[in-house]
Amino acid sequence: MSRAIELFARMHEVRSVTADERGRQTLTGDVILAVFGKVQHKMPLGMDLLMAKYVHDAPAANRIIDVMAIWLNDEPLKRKDLAMALSCVALDVFCDKPVASQKRQLAALWRKCSDQAKRSNRLIKGWQAKIKRLQRNIDACETHAAEERLLSAINDLEALIIKDRRRIDEYAQSQSLKSLTCPRCSGTGLILNTGECPSCNGHGLFIPSVDNIRQHLRHIGLGRVSDKLWENELKPWFEKCLSKLYVKSSDATKMLSNFLYNESDLDNGLCFI
């Protein structure tokens, strides 16, 4: 991540941000915000892309979708409805968000490999062991009241197990929507004492393949796409759209870096690129 993007992301956090060198302040928050505004004026789409990717700004994402719809109007495509759906997928891929066909796999890994899941499994195993002990004690009960107390305790433990499993399911589903990072290797691509992570094939990320993108259309209820339509129209449009997003964001990042560099004291050796 470039210094300019780091400042961009930090500026939208609760704390203010300044750029400094050797403890001496060179760029105040006001100056940085002024630079952001200048780039926003010159490259609104590029800045919206940075906002959507690094700050998760929903209004910026909506504006990007509106721009992509304008791009699509100039294209001689027969299935512009499918192309528009793919435009939204391209934005998700640009923002490093998983597509629908990957979310189930990611959710399963979060449910199994996350720290919260491991903690939950330990708790559930402990509760299950207590349930087995209580069930063995039921046969030794001499009174109905004692048996009822044990059954009540078993029911309470079973309720805890159901509640914790539901909590982990909700957590896994939530995490699977946020990032492409592999939860098994935490994005490193490696498993300790094992080598390459088998879940992400050593990439550290679940990078969407062409098949993932095509399957996404079925996952969102748009049905199957013929090979001819995919190869002749949809795949070229998806690649073109995604390429445009990267180019526009790269141009905005370069302008942002240059403006921040020009505002800084050149003698102190700061470089934002």
Image (cartoon, rainbow, N blue to C red):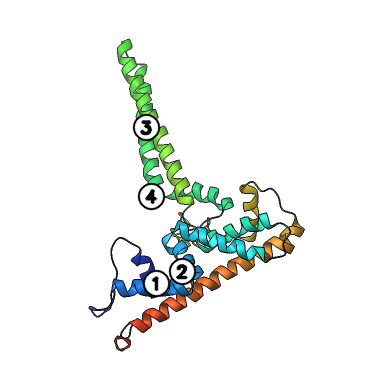
Q: Does the residue at mark 3 contact the one at mark 1 (Cβ under 8 Å)?
A: no
Name the side, left or right, on which 2 lies relative to 64: left
Q: Which amino acid does label 2 sit on?
A: Met
Q: Return the residue at label 1.
A: 36
Q: Is residue 100 above or below residue 33?
A: above
Looking at this rendering, what residue extends furthest in the bottom direction? 267
Q: Residue visible at 55% across and 60% down?
A: 65
Circle on res. 77: none
Judging depth in this view, the residue of 155 and 197 nearest the camera is: 155
Check disc 4 and report its element: helix, strand or loop. helix
According to the picture, the residue beneath numbered tag 4 turns out to be 115
When the figure is inspected, residue 131 is found, relative to residue 253, above or below; the finding is above
Q: Residue at x 41, y 45 (%)?
A: 117
Q: How crowded is mark 2: few (under 14 residues within 10 Å), some or many (20 or more)?
A: many
Residue 57 percent coordinates (x, y) = 44, 59
Q: Identify the element where label 3 is drawn.
A: helix
Label 1: which secondary element: helix
**Residue 47 — which label?**
2
**Gap in Å between the C-alphas at discs 4 and 2?**
35 Å
In the rendering, at what x and y percent does residue 14 appear? Answer: 30, 60
Which one is in front in this view, the residue at disc 2 or the one at disc 3? 2
Q: Nearer the viewer, mark 1 or mark 4?
A: 1
* Amino acid on which the number 3 mark rests in the picture: Leu
Q: What residue type is labelled 4?
A: Asp
The residue at which mark 3 appears reads as 160
Position of residue 49 measured from the top left corner of the image (x, y, whole percent)? 49, 66
